[in-house]
Amino acid sequence: MTRSRRGLALALVLIISVAMVLGACGSKNADNGAGGKTDTTGNAGKSNEPVQLTWYTIGTPQKGVDKVMAEVSKYTASKIGVTVKMVMLDWGDYDQKMKVLTASGTPMDILFTSSWAFDYVQNARKGAFAPINDLLKQYGQGIVKALDPAFLEGSKIDGNNYGIPANKELPAQEVWRFNKNLVDKYKLDIKGVKSLESLEPLLKTIKDKEPDVIPFAINKDYMPVVPYDYIIQSLPMAVSLDTKDYKVVDVLETPEMKQALKTMHSYYKAGYVSPEAATTTSLDDVQKSGNWFLDRAATQPFADNLWSQSYGYPIVSTPASDSVIFNWSVMGSMQAISANSKHPDKAMQFLNLLNTDPVLRNMVDSGIEGVHYKKTGANRMENLPEAKNYDMPTFSLGNIMLTYLNPGDPDDKWEQFKKFNAEGKPAPTLGFNFDSSKVTGELAAVQNVKGEFWPALMTGTVDPDEYLPKAIEKFKAAGLDKIIAEAQRQLDEWRASKK
């Protein structure tokens, strides 16, 4: 079983052995989730030879991928007439590599997209993804039935769907995660922790007493939590969460961000943050070793159990933000069909099966029963040592509510997920998708400036008193004010249309 080691939400996993899988094909899994029997060829009257689908997805490349996909392909070939080749691209490389691959027309069928990696909205508008409204109607009714309607409705772009959101937590809530071994060792009280500044006494204790431990583990993608709703995730255009006037501002000029950057710089100077944080792409090795005390992640119900199971040592967490439904949380994990796929119908059939069939969903997520995990009950499992070679980011792979429970998870976990989803507060711009077509040149220039300043500022590596004014000036020179004005115009029109 596997879990994402990033700050996005994770999920549980199950798997059934290949013998059991094949034996189940004629019983409860004979229904394809769309209300009818599975067409084993997927297209009556055509060749019975399975179609190979190529699936590009995000995450640290795993040694066991080809071995697991061979077993997955046996199952999907018998169910819908497809085999699957998975290509994993590492977290820090995914966005740029996917831009190059799609621009060059590299053959692919299914690809991971989101609000934070290979931007869903922008790439849909560029034509990278096939529109799927008709495909959903024909081959994806199981998906439609399985998803909370807010996922498909909230991910529409100009009335069209271009991707399948993962059925997972709907709101976004950030938490501070702690290595519980160190919390217990030094009897640290984490109950009152929420703000960035409140972490300081804990970080100081670890810095003084554990010289080989990173007190605050962050990488180049880190951003302090500030109470703003971003027009484009990780770019400085934003609206205050408690806005009354819906004014789009440069978040770098807000008092909340200025204070957060000063605090991060003080933490960097104190040695709480790694000197390489601004250039670090992955924290996998640090987290595997356990040589860290604190980081931040997006949570979900019972996430501590998931993280503890994945890392092999206990994790505890406390809230770092409120629970808010953002566009980026609705679009936080999606699978799209490539615009150049030669088999869009088969790709949709595969995605439908992935999101409705627990055998396939958990095989993709967890690997092979008896090799990567063992079952401990009808709907429970535990990792085996070989899971280290197939440690997948669960949240990125589809409907997490099909996955088995980990040790310590309550029987009503998925009911608690539904409760968590229902309690999220909508963000001010929920449902608004910025069309950047009139500012493409400015947006590209702003992205370049971000690459120059953002990681160093956000991780505290440089002094914000010196570098923040320089960054603000360069963003303006790149055309940020024009982007903000265009975003404001569209946001005002969107609000007027809602009224």
Image (cartoon, rainbow, N blue to C red):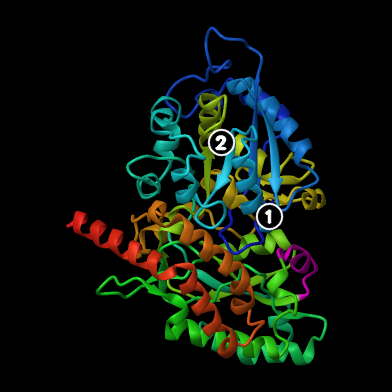
Q: Position of residue 268 (x, y in %)?
A: 68, 86
Q: Residue at x 72, y 41 (%)?
A: 367
Tell which circle, 1 or 2, labels the residue nearer the N-terminal end.
1
Residue at which label 2 appears? 354
Q: Which mark is residue 93?
A: 1
Measure the alpha-carbon separation of dots 1 and 2.
25 Å
Q: Position of residue 282 (x, y in %)?
A: 71, 63
Looking at this view, name the residue that lies furthest to the left.
499
Q: Residue at x 36, y 58 (%)?
A: 422
- The reply to whether residue 200 is in sight is yes
Q: Is residue 228 above or below residue 75?
A: below
Left or right: 75 with respect to 476?
right
- The reply to whether residue 416 is in sight is no
The image quarter containing residue 92 is bottom right
Q: Is residue 286 magenta?
A: yes
Q: Secondary structure at mark 1?
A: helix
The three-letter code of the residue at mark 1 reads: Asp
